[in-house]
Amino acid sequence: MDGNGRWAKKKGLFRAIGHENGTKAVREAVEGAAEIGVENLTLYAFSTENWNRPKLEVDTLMKLLVSALKKEIKTLQKNNISLCAIGNLESLPDKARHELLEVIEKTKDNNHMKLTLALSYGSREELIKTIQEISIKVKNNVISPHLINEAVINEHLYTKNLPDVDLLIRTSGEQRISNFLLWQIAYAELYFTEILWPDFKKPHLFEAIYNYQQRERRFGKTSDQLS
């Protein structure tokens, strides 16, 4: 979800207006994904690095999060979508965290699609947390070092209840990962678009998914092995 600030700047508007319009694009993406049967959708809403932005902008983003959660719970319920969140949620302001957890609780039984918000999330921070937790278990003889494998690591990630990423979409023309799900995107297909996030509509989502469907995912094998 990249390009809110640049979208606003191009139109001579305050960055806050860009973020506000970005929430409308969230609804487009969520409803579009639900329409075509996507089972899991994760949105990178706020990174650990975003805390370094000006306080006024951070405060605005947190207020937008609260208002969007209050407003969009109807959309989630209507489309039978459950909300989840990954990241250091304890670092969120009390009001934002309370509203987030309340919506998660209210939608937990919905089963058409799982929408996950990455909030105060950074993949390096996640991996450090994982290493620390496993190290403590090794120290306490809960697990032997030689038994540590991908499954053990996955169990300690924020995303332990999510499958690996199939498709990563990055808007606004940026072609980098920006500390997002580094472990989980090992075999993900990457799709970059020049569209700024507030302008990202359902057709753009469908185009990205169609592009993904045309690709051959080999997972280290040859094309002949897959045929």
Image (tube, rainbow, N blue to C red):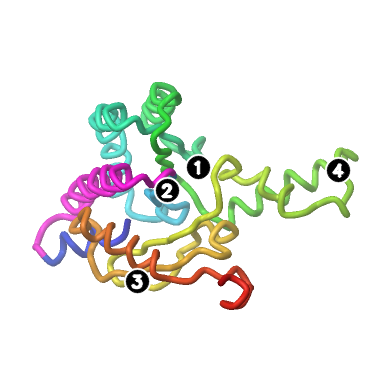
In magenta, the rendered stretch is 11-39
User: Of residues 13 and 35, which is closer to you in this image?
Assistant: 35
Which percent across, then down, holds residue 115? 40, 40
> Which callout, 4 or 2, points at the residue further toward the start of the chain?
2
Which percent across, then down, holds residue 130? 68, 48
Secondary element under disc 2, as helix, strand or loop, is: strand
- Give the distance between the C-alpha atoms of the residues marked 1 and 2, in whole angstroms: 9 Å
Quadrant in which the C terminus is drawn: bottom right
> Which callout, 1 or 3, points at the residue further toward the start of the chain?
1
Give the residue type at disc 2: Thr
Name the residue carrying label 2. Answer: 42
Cβ atoms at labels 4 and 2 below 8 Å apart? no
Q: Quadrant of residue 27?
A: top left
Cβ atoms at labels 1 and 2 below 8 Å apart? yes
**Vertical relation: 51 (above or below) 71:** below
Name the residue carrying label 3. Answer: 174
**Vertical relation: 161 (above or below) 51:** above
Which percent across, then down, holds residue 123? 55, 56
Q: Viewed as shown, does residue 170 lie left or right of 11? A: right
Cβ atoms at labels 1 and 3 below 8 Å apart? no
Q: Viewed as shown, does residue 187 lie left or right of 51? A: right
Q: Residue at x 44, y 60 (%)?
A: 167
- Give the distance between the C-alpha atoms of the residues marked 4 and 2, in whole angstroms: 31 Å
Name the residue carrying label 4. Answer: 143
